[in-house]
Image: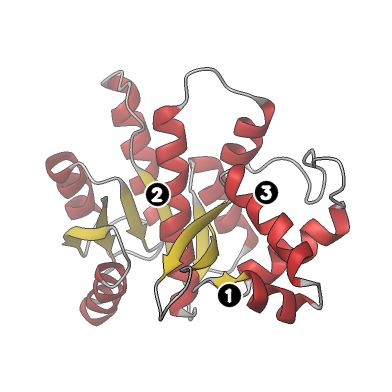
Amino acid sequence: MLKVLVVDDDFMVAKLHSRQVAATEDCTVVGVAHTGADALRAAERLRPDLLLLDVYLPDMDGIRVLRELRAAEERALASGPGVDALFITAARDGATVRSALRAGAHHYLLKPFHQAALREQLRHVAAARSRLGALETARQEDVDQLFGTRPPGSRELPKGLAAHTAELVERTLRDHPAGLSAAECAGAGALSRVSARRYLEFFAETGRARVSLRYGGTGRPERRYTWVA
C-alpha cells in the first residue's frame, strides 16, 4: 500500500487530489497539509511513501519542503527508501522545474492534468519502490528502469523483437493507462495480435508492464497489460 501525504494550500484542490489517490488501487491518503511547515511535521509523524506537493505554499515553496526532507533523511542516516515527491503545480517556468528535478522529485505534473496521469504516476512510484526494495545486485536493466536514463528504444531486446515496434507498443500502453488486452493493443497499434502479445509479454517479464486477469464467461481469462515503468 502506497502511503500518500497530500500538500496543497487550496483546501478544495487537496480534497480533490485525496479522492483521486483513494480511488487508485493500493494507494491510501495518510494525511493532508496546507503549508510547508505542516507538511514537514506531518511527514515526520506519518512517514509517508510519497508527497503530492504543490510549489506554491503560503510559508515556503514546495522545493524547499523537499530539500528539508532530504536533509533530514541524511542527518538521520536513513537506510530505507525515504520519501518520494510528485509535484502537482501550476508553476511552469523552467527554473522551478529544474529546481524540482535537482531536489529529487520523482515527477512533475502541471495543472490542470487528467486524472489518468496521476494514477499512472502513483503506479509508477509504487512499482519503482517495490523494485528498489527488492534489489540486491543490480543489472544495467534494473538501473535503467529506476533512473529512466537510457534513451527510448535502446534497451536490449530479445532476438526477433524490433526497437521501433517496441516503442510503438510502449506508446500504445502509455496512452491507455487503464490497460489493454493483446487484441486491443494490436488494434490500436495496427499490429497483429501475435506480434502485440510478444512485446506485451516481454514488457511484463522485464517489469515494465503489469498483467492482470479479467474473468468473463467460459474459457480462459483475458490477460490485460498496464504500463508501469
Q: Which residue is mark 2?
A: 126
Helix or strand or loop: what does disc 3 sit on? Answer: helix
Q: Residue at x 47, y 25 (%)?
A: 135
Q: Is residue 90 visible?
A: no
Q: Is residue 165 visible?
A: yes
Q: Earlier in the sequence, mark 2 or mark 1?
A: 2
Q: Residue furthest left?
A: 45
User: Whole-Å distance between the Cαs marked 3 and 2?
Assistant: 20 Å
Residue 202 against residue 52 in the figure, above or below: above
Q: Earlier in the sequence, mark 3 or mark 2?
A: 2
User: Whole-Å distance between the Cαs marked 3 and 1?
Assistant: 18 Å
- Tell me the tag on residue 202: 3
* Colour mapping: secondary structure
With 65 as the anchor, is 86 left or right in this view? right
With 199 as the anchor, is 29 left or right in this view? left
Q: Position of residue 154 (x, y in %)?
A: 82, 43
Q: Nearer the viewer, residue 222 or 185?
A: 222
Q: Give the number of the mark in front: 3 or 2.
A: 3
Q: Nearer the viewer, residue 216 or 7?
A: 216
Q: Residue furthest front?
A: 218
Helix or strand or loop: what does disc 2 sit on? Answer: helix
Q: Position of residue 61 (x, y in %)?
A: 37, 56
Amino acid type, residue under disc 2 in the picture: Ala
Quadrant assignment, res 184: bottom right
Quadrant assignment, res 83: top left
Residue 95 against residue 158 in the figure, above or below: below
Q: Which residue is mark 1?
A: 176
Q: Residue at x 32, y 38 (%)?
A: 69
Q: Nearer the viewer, residue 78 or 223?
A: 223
